[in-house]
Amino acid sequence: MTQPLLKEEAQPEAPAATAAMGVGATLRHLRQAKGYTPAEVSARLKFSHRQLEALETEQWDRLPGGMSLRGFVKNYARFLEADVDALLVMLDAQVGSTAPKAVPITSANSLGPTDLSIQGEPAHRPWGWIIVILILLFVAGFYAIERGWVPDSWLIFDWLKSLKT
């Protein structure tokens, strides 16, 4: 890897030595070149001092893996104005792939009729509640007729009028 890790305007030294170092040593070297202390970086990036020390000493078992580690290195590299992509490539080579895994996309042909709802209706209908509500309305109606709360003009059928008396 012969490309510089610092951006062109911020290179204090030749970065040829950083190519042989690991990610942690490279970040430590860049931090020292910028004149930051570990406490300043820790406070600025909101990482604990132990995490920062573990990264710079490349103690990967003391750090979270996967995307968290990748984000940690990315934020640290941005803070130091370093080449983020080059450091992430170095990280992947050193730790293994920390990039997000590709999610397979199924084609529309593989979906069956049960996978796609035409109307977007729920799988079951609340028939039980509908029946309970209808029964309650039916009972309340007969109770209102029996108590005389319903006017005679509303009672169309003769058998309903017989319930009123």
Image (cartoon, rainbow, N blue to C red):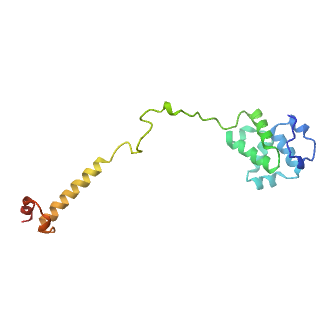
User: In the displayed structure, does residue 98 sit left or right of residue 105?
Assistant: right
Q: Residue at x 23, y 54 (%)?
A: 134
Residue 157 is situated, as x and y percent measured from the top left of the image, at 9, 59
Q: Residue at x 44, y 32 (%)?
A: 112
In the rendered image, the vertical position of residue 98 relative to residue 158, given as above or below: above
Q: Nearer the viewer, residue 104 or 135?
A: 104
In the rendered image, the vertical position of residue 13 relative to residue 165, given as above or below: above
Q: Looking at the rendering, which quadrant does residue 20 occupy?
A: top right
Q: Residue at x 18, y 58 (%)?
A: 139
Q: Looking at the rendering, which quadrant does residue 119 occupy?
A: top left
Q: Residue at x 81, y 55 (%)?
A: 40
Q: Looking at the rendering, which quadrant does residue 98 occupy?
A: top right
Which residue reaches farthest right? 13
User: In the displayed structure, does residue 26 sit left or right of residue 65?
Assistant: right
Q: Nearer the viewer, residue 115 or 119?
A: 119
Location of the N terminus by quadrant is top right
User: In the displayed structure, does residue 55 sit left or right of residue 123?
Assistant: right
Residue 160 is situated, as x and y percent measured from the top left of the image, at 10, 60
Which residue reaches farthest top? 110
Residue 123 is situated, as x and y percent measured from the top left of the image, at 38, 42
Location of the C terminus by quadrant is bottom left
Q: How many numbered discs? A: 0
